[in-house]
Amino acid sequence: MNADGLLDGLAGAFGALVVAGVVASSVRTIVLPRGATARLSRAVFVSLRLAFKIRIRSSTSYEVRDRLLAFYGPVGLLCLLGTWVGGIVIGFTAMFWAVGVHPLRAAFTISGSSITTLGIAVPHGLPQTTFAFAEAAAGLIELALLITFLPNIYSDFNRRELEVTKLQVEAGNPPEGPRILLRLHALERLEARTELWVRWIEWFTVVEQTHSSFPALAFFRSPAAERSWITAAGAVLDGAALAASCLDLPRDYEAELCLRGGYLCLRHIAQLFRLPFDADPAPDDPIAVTRGEFDEVWARLDSAGLPLRADRDRAWRDFAGWRVNYEEALIRLATLTEAPLAPWSSDRGLVDGRTQTFIERIRR
């Protein structure tokens, strides 16, 4: 084989690999119903994230950051589509060049003509015609996948945000776990907390499934700047942990199931983003909520007349034992998604993989 033949063969192999990589990325991102890591999709979103970070400086106000970051998820989808289409064009350009379409500009022209089905360049011979048909089919399939994919993405987003929006009635804005119990007690409907835990067990199940299938959903921000899916999740889990550990009532099985469903959901999503967390924490590991903060909440609950256990020390140990299961994943996801300030979630900090007692991130 002469040098030209070898170069054609290498170009054809390169083009085939590029097209195969794009197709594999599309299938793993859109078609495969599980949390599989697509390197190309990840590279697109990580690169775009770096561009957004350059634009958003630490001195920028939260309102400005939120406005800019609201574009991150949607723009990421468009960039991903552009990357897929561009990859197909580049791959088939190399393949057309390998079968004799010279110079490179002519190969690019016929590749672009094929994927857009414009017909401005006519292939000659069986290999070129075969590649033209294959590229046109690949372009149509990519477009069809995205058209069917977008409604699913926004349907999942709306399902997530429905409960987040409803929670402000029960937990306030920003959401706060103790406020759930205080408001229900004020309405003389403390028993209704069971319905709330059941609702959020289903919510955690749905979010784990949808955000695992398409992790970029985690970066789709709520319509209101002060709301976030991650701070809402933290408030519900804190409310359930307080109910399970502090209330002097029959065992709250739904609260405990909600806690388990919540920390499994958050851990799974954090794992997809390769965020470090302790998967098997000890019940007495330190948490970012201090004993003093817990005592303040206890005093609020007590002054409102909620039935509390006699042993406050035991209640604190039980609360910390529940929270340690979800705290690290919660705080890391809140930091990753630039969540708005909310008690005991986005206002916490992590140092060297361990929870620090209390670090409030100042947001002007």
Image (cartoon, rainbow, N blue to C red):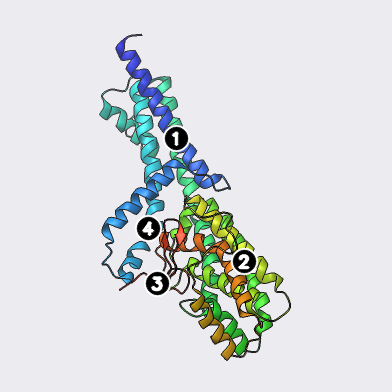
> Closer to the N terminus: mark 4 or mark 3?
4
Residue at the location (62% across, 60% down)?
205
Three-letter amino acid code at disc 3? Ala
Tell me if 44 is positioned left or right of 287 in this view. Answer: left
**194 and 297: which one is in front?**
297
Q: Which residue is mark 4?
A: 72
Three-letter amino acid code at disc 1? Gly
> Closer to the N terminus: mark 1 or mark 4?
1
Q: Give above or below for 169 relative to 163.
A: below
Q: Which residue is mark 2?
A: 259
Looking at the figure, which quarter contains the C terminus? bottom left
Between disc 1 and disc 2, the foreground one is: 2
Residue at the location (50% across, 80% down)?
172
Tell me if 193 is positioned left or right of 54 in this view. Answer: right
Check whether the beta carbons of the residues at disc 1 and disc 4 lie within 8 A of each other.
no
Q: Quadrant of residue 98?
A: top left
**Residues under labels 1 and 3: Cα distance?**
37 Å
**321 and 255: which one is in front?**
321
